């Protein structure tokens, strides 16, 4: 693949950059919120809701602000185990603009798929296509005022820290330094002609940790690895389980009381949980509880 230039990327993403600037400069939203909102909209475009961002161009500031608030409601929904979902789905303006039904319930049911996809877009796309805007808006001029232009500013040659990150759900971001239009390799493009596609769909680059379930068993009812494998492959597909790691046997009962299970995709995590924090299963009269693995280190 031939390297492409930053200016080509900016030209292709002209509409996305225009909407991002409106959020940042006209609506005065925090840069971290602008990045997350745009990443959410770009992710939606990639998973079956085309032309989300183009529909926002030319909207009045009050109307754009109202749609942005719906996007923020989606992000908040992803942060909560039991979100409050208004009657009607909570996203009337977004549904009208994209001419497709979409609701907060969808985000709740596909919570971990959405988190992984938005995080992927955030780190692989958004920080690149908006980097120069972020550098200039967040850089400080010699008088201590925030710059509002888009030319190179002092102190913008290094990577940029964005207030609001690390985010409790989406983690940290690293905004690259200004490139001065040097050629760069970008993984998400096949080309920059009329047909631009993702060589790797968002959430394909997630870690095993993001696809891992934590399983617990009842004391006195020993569960085997074979039973775990049979239960989940029978219900969610032969290739749904990649690895099962049974915990060390409990000294008193000589049985594992927990296990971790790496799945084939984040989507399977959502299929198992179906919007719940903990899913309960039963095999051979023995209960198995499954929840999303959380690395607390």
Image: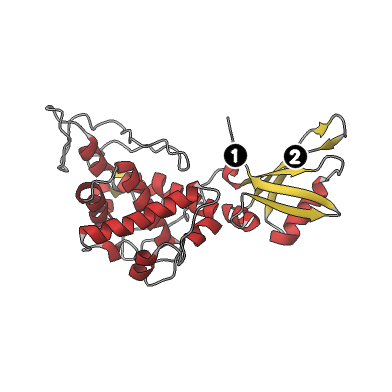
Q: Who comes first in sequence, dot 1 or dot 2?
A: 2
How far across and down, in percent of the image, does residue 35 sit? 34, 47
Q: How many marks?
A: 2
Is residue 186 visible in the rendered image? The answer is no
Left or right: 44, with 133 as reference point: right
Left or right: 59, with 246 as reference point: left
Outermost residue to the bottom: 99
Q: Looking at the image, is 112 positioned above or below residue 176? A: below
Q: CA distance from mark 1 to mark 2?
A: 14 Å
Instruction: Say which residue label 2 marks.
Output: 258
How far across and down, in percent of the image, does residue 51 sit? 34, 66
**Local crowd size for mark 1, using a 10 Å CA cut-off: few (<14), some (14–19), many (≥20):** few
Which one is in front, 288 or 181?
Answer: 288
Element on which disc 2 rests: strand
Coloring scheme used: secondary structure
Which one is in front, 167 or 190?
Answer: 167
Q: Looking at the image, is 89 positioned above or below residue 33? A: below
Is residue 41 visible in the rendered image? The answer is yes
The C terminus: image quadrant: top right
Kindly indicate whether the residue at mark 2 contacts the one at mark 1 (C-beta within 8 angstroms): no
Point 17% across, 35% down: residue: 146
Outermost residue to the left: 143
Left or right: 187, with 30 as reference point: right
Which one is in front, 163 or 39?
Answer: 163
Point 86% across, 44% down: residue: 221
Point 87% across, 34% down: residue: 254
How far across and down, in percent of the image, does residue 104 sit? 47, 59
Q: Quarter-wise, where is residue 177 in the image?
A: top left
Instruction: Say which residue label 1 marks.
Output: 294
């Amino acid at each position: 693949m031939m390297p492409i230039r930053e200016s080509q990327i900016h030209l292709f993403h002209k509409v996305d950059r225009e909407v991002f600037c409106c959020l940042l400069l006209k609506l005065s939203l925090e840069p971290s919120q602008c990045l997350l909102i745009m990443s959410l909209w770009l992710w939606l475009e990639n998973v079956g809701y085309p032309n989300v961002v183009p529909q926002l161009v030319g909207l009045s500031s009050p109307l754009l602000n109202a749609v942005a608030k719906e996007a923020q409601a989606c992000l908040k929904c992803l942060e909560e185990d039991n979100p409050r979902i208004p009657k009607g789905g909570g996203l009337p303006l977004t549904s009208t603009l994209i001419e497709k039904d979409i609701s907060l319930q969808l985000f709740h049911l596909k919570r971990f798929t959405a988190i992984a996809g938005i995080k992927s877009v955030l780190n692989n796309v958004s920080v690149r296509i908006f980097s120069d805007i972020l550098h200039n808006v967040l850089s400080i001029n010699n008088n201590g005022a925030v710059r509002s232009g888009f030319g190179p500013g002092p102190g913008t040659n290094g990577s940029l820290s964005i207030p609001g990150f690390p985010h409790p759900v989406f983690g940290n971001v690293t905004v690259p330094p200004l490139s001065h239009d040097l050629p760069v390799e970008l993984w998400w493009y096949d080309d920059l002609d009329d047909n631009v596609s993702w060589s790797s769909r968002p959430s394909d680059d997630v870690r095993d940790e993001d696809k891992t379930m934590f399983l617990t068993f009842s004391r006195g009812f020993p569960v085997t690895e074979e039973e775990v494998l049979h239960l989940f492959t029978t219900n969610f597909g032969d290739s749904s389980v990649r690895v099962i790691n049974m915990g060390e046997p409990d000294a008193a009962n000589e049985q594992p009381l927990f296990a971790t299970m790496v799945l084939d995709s984040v989507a399977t995590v959502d299929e198992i949980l179906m919007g719940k924090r903990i899913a309960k299963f039963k095999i051979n009269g023995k209960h198995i509880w499954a929840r999303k693995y959380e690395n607390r280190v």
